[in-house]
Structures are given as structure tokens and as C-alpha cells.
Amino acid sequence: MKKTTWKRTTLFITILSVIAIIAVGCNTPKKEESSTNALERIKSEGKIVIGMMGTYPPYNFLNEKKEVDGFDAEMAREIAKRMGVQAEIVTGEFSGLIEGLQKNKFDGLISQVTITDDRKKTIDFSAPYIKNAVNVVVKADNDTIKSVEDFKGKKIGVGLGTNDEKYLREQVLPKVGDFEIATYNDVITSLMDLNTGRIDATINNVFALKPIVDKNNLKIKAVGEPIKEDVAGVAIKKGQPELLEAINKAFDEMKKDGTYAAIHKKWFDVEPTL
């Protein structure tokens, strides 16, 4: 009887020990990938995964071969090449790109991610690689909307999760008065809706308008002076200074040897203003 009790006691203690070990293991925080490890992993794998929309010509879009093409795509591939790796481009809706970056779906974003103080609180940016002017866009026969001051009582389209949406909600609405904001996951749909009268106006980057207008024979126009200018950068997760330095170094080399200017002029027919 005593021997059986001793065995049961020993077994009970052993079980408690195992449970304690498991509990300690469960409570141990998962070690985050260090900044050095991030860059080393990219070089070891021979690729950097870049997220972009793929629906925003001439910045990024699918060409006739169903390949991601455009200014952003060419910049991504050139930066990757100078880092000694390949660029693997993964497309997705803009509203989910930053969340995907935070969840390690991407190593970086090159998709016209505007550099803002709010975004810099949660992600890091490279040096700006493009400056964009944003204008009010209306139907070709619309002579009543000439600036954001005329938005009151109108339905205005804008990209979901973009800096332009934030600008409309936080700056234009309080100043101009009530108007409806319709959000879109891609630029093409918003411009098509503008063309058919489903919305009264939108605000967009002037570089993005021409290829869409030409391809779809849209009867729309940009009006007035630019309402604002934005700069975009390569976005990466915070705490990866070595990766950020490698990206900035590649971009700086592109600027010095003229490659950057050539890419910019190829897609926009003007010299860069940065």
C-alpha cells in the first residue's frame, strides 16, 4: 500500500513539473526578428517581398503579359538588384498593405505610400522617391466644382485608407461643410464612377490620371491648382535600421548615376523634382 502511494505521489509530482515547464514556455514572449536578421534573411533567401496595389497605372499595374509593371514596379526591381536580391512583388488592396507589412506578409511597400507623421508612428520610411501633386477631378462638362470649396452637399470619391481620404475627412470636411465621402479600393473604379455621374468629384494624383483616361476614353478633367503635394517613400516595419539603410543606399546610387531620373522620365515624361 505504501509502495503504491509512493508511486502515485511521484507520478503526481512529475505531472506538475511537466505542466510548470509548459506554462513557462507558453509565457515566454516570442523573440522578434531583429533588424540585422531581417536584412540577413532577405539576402539569404535572395529576395525581398514588396507589396503594392497593382491597379494604379502608371505607378503599378498588370501589363499585357499579366506582369506587375509601372514606375513603382521598376523602382522595386532596381532597388532589389542593387541590394543583391530579386524583388518578389505581391499585390493587394491599398487599405490592407500596411496591415500586411505589420504581419510580415511583406518586407516593404512600394505603392505610393505617402509619408505622414501619423504613419511614421507605426512604420518607417525611406527617403522620398517621388513627389506627387493632387488635384480636384470632375466630369468634363462640370463647371460648378472648381476646388474643394465647392464640395459641400456633393458626393466625393477617394481611395480607401489613403492619405487623400484622411485629408478629406480631417481637413476639408471641417472647413467646407458636410459632403458625402465614397471610398474605393482602386482608382479605376472611382474614375469610372465619376465618368458616369455616380460621384460628383474625386481628388487624385495628376500623374495617375492620363493613362486611365486615355485607355478608357473617360470624359473627366483636373481643375484648379494642386490642392496639396505629397511625397511617397518605401515603407518597412519599425526597428529595421540596417534594412532601411540598404534601401536608402540603393536609391541614392540610382539618383547619382541617373537611373532614377531615367525611370521617372520614362513613366511621367518629366524630370523628378526631388
Image: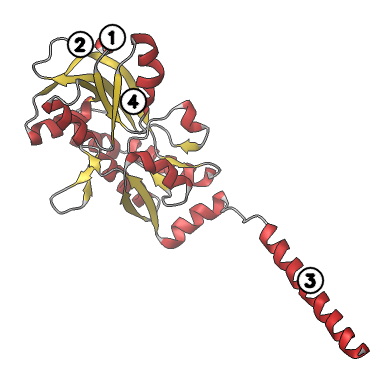
Q: Which residue occupies the foreground of this view, 186 or 53?
A: 186
Q: In which quarter of the image is residue 174?
A: top left
Task: Residue at 23% x, 34% y: name it.
Answer: 187
Quadrant showing the C terminus: top left
In this rendering, is residue 5 above or below 140? below
Which residue is situated farthest in the right direction here?
2
Q: Is residue 269 visible?
A: no
> Residue 48 has which mark?
none
Dot 4 or dot 1: first in sequence order is 1
Secondary structure found at label 1: helix
Instruction: Find residue 25 and report its horizontal and vertical position in percent.
Output: 69, 63
Q: Can residue 226 be seen in this view?
A: yes
Amino acid type of the residue that numbered disc 3 sits on in the rendered structure = Leu
Dot 3 or dot 1: first in sequence order is 3
Closer to the observer: label 2 or label 3? Answer: 3
Which residue is situated farthest in the front direction here?
1
Task: Residue at 35% x, 31% y: name it.
Answer: 162
Secondary structure found at label 3: helix
Amino acid type of the residue that numbered disc 4 sits on in the rendered structure = Asp
Q: Which residue occupies the foreground of this view, 146 or 88?
A: 146
- Which residue is the site of mark 3? 16
Closer to the observer: label 4 or label 3? Answer: 3
Q: Residues within 10 Å of mark 4 (few under 14, many from 20)?
A: many
